[in-house]
Image: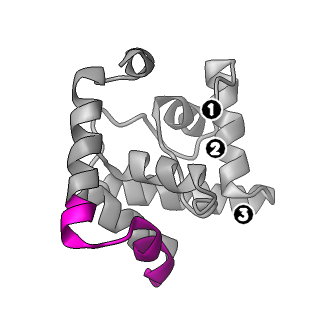
Amino acid sequence: SGYLNVVRFKNKKGEYVVEARNKFYESGISLKKLISDSPDIISARNYLAVNIKGFGYKEASHFLRNIGRGDAVAILDRHILKNLKNCCVIDAVPESMTPNKYFDIENRLLAFAGELGIPPDHLDFVMWYNEAGEIFK
């Protein structure tokens, strides 16, 4: 109840969580098994983004990062996008994000991280902190 007051779209979050729970329960699919049986983490993220209401690629990447499986995917939020623009990795912060645009920018972030010799999950965390100025998790 009060826990959702600090998140965006709080009126729909609970509904989406219950719907996802029911979807997995009714189908007999184990989320843990789905992730571990995926050929790679990108496939697992794609499944989550396409099949779970309220999840997009950013949210699916964030979920995988939170469970220790998302070190090879980027969480492209507005803070990171702004920093990617400031570092000349992208020309502009997109007004909207299609899946193809997300993948393109993610690949640019991954390449940039490789050039710098920094793991992608560390780079986007530093970029996020640089813009947000706080760690709240």
Question: Crowding near pointer 1: few (<14 within 10 Å), some, many (20+)?
Answer: many
Q: Is residue 28 visible?
A: yes
Q: Is residue 53 visible?
A: no
User: In terms of depth relative to the viewer, which is nearer, 121 or 24?
Assistant: 24
Whether residues under marks 1 and 3 lie with C-beta atoms below 8 angstroms apart, the answer is: no
Question: Crowding near pointer 2: few (<14 within 10 Å), some, many (20+)?
Answer: many
Image quadrant where residue 2 sits: top left
Q: Magenta stretch: give its range.
A: 23-39
Identify which amino acid the numbered label 2 is placed on.
Asp
Q: Which mark is residue 10?
A: none
Q: Residue at x 29, y 32 (%)?
A: 13
The percent coordinates of residue 116 (x first, y second) are 78, 55
User: In terms of depth relative to the viewer, which is nearer, 128 or 5?
Assistant: 5
The percent coordinates of residue 103 (x first, y second) are 40, 60
Task: Say which residue label 2 marks.
Answer: 124
Whether residues under marks 2 and 1 lie with C-beta atoms below 8 angstroms apart, the answer is: yes
Which secondary structure is most common in the magenta stretch?
Answer: helix
Q: Residue at x 28, y 52 (%)?
A: 21
Task: Say which residue label 1 marks.
Answer: 128
Magenta includes 37?
Answer: yes
Task: Say which residue label 3 marks.
Answer: 114
**Image quarter (top left, top right, bottom left or bottom right) of the N terminus:** top left
Question: Crowding near pointer 3: few (<14 within 10 Å), some, many (20+)?
Answer: few
